[in-house]
Image (spheres, rainbow, N blue to C red):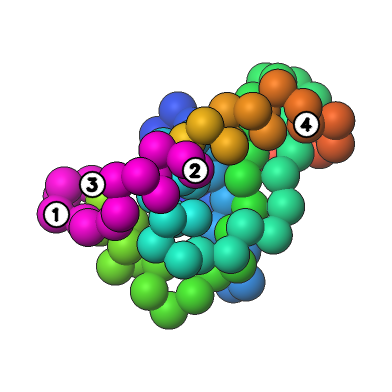
């Protein structure tokens, strides 16, 4: 499944997004980030999460604005992921 300009890729075992705030939300909700890479064409950084049964529910709650995560944890994750974006060396590509 591919959605919006950020290109969200949902596979059988992975969930990949370049939306930094959604990635910070998933990390704050306890989802395990497996990898990250910079797309060679768009130069965007993509975050790859282990897909779990609750990912669809978390994503729906994120967009409905009724998700609850610890504010300090979310803020820390945003800062960490922004820092990671500046340091990602791994180059990959997203198949569309």
Magenta part of the chain: 63-77
**Percent position of residue 88, x then y:** 78, 31
The residue tagged 2 is 77
- Tell me if 95 is positioned left or right of 18 in this view: right
Q: Quadrant of residue 82?
A: top right
Give the main secondary structure, helix, strand or loop, of the magenta stretch.
helix
Image height check: is 81 above or below 70? above
Q: In which quadrant is the C terminus drawn?
A: top right
Q: CA distance from mark 2 to mark 1?
A: 19 Å
Can residue 58 be seen from the camera position used here? yes
Give the label, 3 or 1, closer to the camera.
1
Q: Earlier in the sequence, mark 4 or mark 2?
A: 2
Residue under numbered circle 4: 88
Task: Indicate whether 31 appears above or below 39.
Answer: below
Query: Quick one: SS at disc 1?
Result: loop
**N-terminal-most mark, 2 or 1:** 1
Q: Is residue 57 left or right of residue 30?
A: left
Q: Is residue 17 left or right of residue 28?
A: right
Q: Earlier in the sequence, mark 4 or mark 1?
A: 1
Q: Looking at the image, is mark 4 or mark 2 nearer the viewer?
A: 2
Q: Is residue 65 magenta?
A: yes
> How many discs appear?
4
Nearest the eye: 59 or 80:
80
Give residue 66's mark: 1
- Mark 2 secondary-structure assignment: helix
Give the residue number, with chain letter if any, for mark 3: 63
The image position of residue 39, as x and y in percent, is: 73, 30
Q: Position of residue 67 (x, y in %)?
A: 21, 56
């Amino acid at each position: 499944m591919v959605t919006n300009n950020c290109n969200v890729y949902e596979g059988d075992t992975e969930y990949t997004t370049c939306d930094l705030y959604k990635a910070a939300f998933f990390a704050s909700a306890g989802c395990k980030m497996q990898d990250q890479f910079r797309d060679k064409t768009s130069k965007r950084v993509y975050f790859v999460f282990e897909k779990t049964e609750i990912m669809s529910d978390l994503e729906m709650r994120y967009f409905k604005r009724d998700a609850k995560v610890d504010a300090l944890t979310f803020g820390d994750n945003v800062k960490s992921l922004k820092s990671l974006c500046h340091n990602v060396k791994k180059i990959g590509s997203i198949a569309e």
